[in-house]
Image (tube, grey):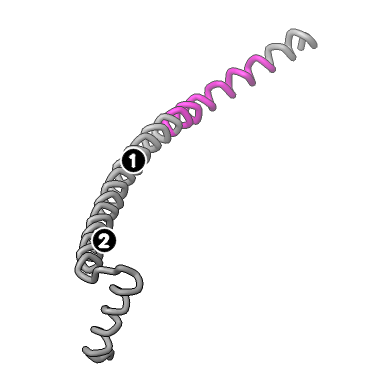
């Protein structure tokens, strides 16, 4: 650790050679620290806000996809229910066409 005399000598050297004011520098560092701290707080709040928005968007998207899949599932069930009847009607039409063509 730097001794108090060495620190004071360094401070005087900085003031003499570079026109550095330690009190102003300390005040500047305090302001910068406050700005950085506020920046981190704002960034953390923004991240939390984005997470919340993403959660809402994902929930909305899942709900929309569930609704679409339900519509598709209903249509497939409808096709599945009507398929035997349509297949039977097609078979009757094929037999009728065979009878009409070959006259059995």
User: Over which residues does the magenta segment extend?
Assistant: 73-94
Task: Depth check: give the residue in front, 32 or 22.
Answer: 22
Reply yes or no: does residue 25 show up in magenta: no
In the picture, measured across the screen, residue 67 lies left or right of residue 32, that is right
Task: Depth check: give the residue in front, 76 or 103.
Answer: 76
Where is residue 84 shown, x and y percent of the image?
Answer: 54, 27
At a point 68% along the width and 12% down the height, the residue shown is: 96
Q: Earlier in the sequence, mark 1 or mark 2?
A: 2
At a point 22% along the width and 68% down the height, the residue shown is: 26
Instruction: Tell me the residue that label 1 is attached to.
Output: 57
Q: Is residue 92 above or below residue 35?
A: above
In what element is the residue under mark 1?
helix
In the picture, measured across the screen, residue 100 lies left or right of residue 16, that is right
The residue sitting at the right extreme is 102
The residue sitting at the front extreme is 16
Q: Is residue 76 above or below residue 91?
A: below
Instruction: Tell me the residue that label 2 is attached to.
Output: 32
Task: Depth check: give the residue in front, 65 or 60.
Answer: 60
In the picture, measured across the screen, residue 5 lies left or right of residue 97, that is left
Q: How many marks?
A: 2
């Amino acid at each position: 650790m730097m001794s108090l005399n060495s620190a004071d000598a360094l401070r005087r050297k900085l003031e003499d050679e570079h026109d550095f004011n330690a009190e102003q520098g300390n005040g500047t560092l305090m302001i910068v620290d406050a700005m950085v701290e506020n920046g981190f707080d704002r960034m953390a709040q923004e991240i939390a806000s984005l997470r919340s928005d993403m959660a809402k968007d994902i929930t909305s998207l899942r709900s929309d996809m569930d609704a679409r899949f339900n519509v598709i599932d209903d249509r497939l069930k409808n096709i599945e229910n009507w398929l035997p009847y349509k297949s039977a009607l097609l078979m009757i039409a094929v037999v009728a066409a065979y009878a009409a063509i070959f006259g059995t």
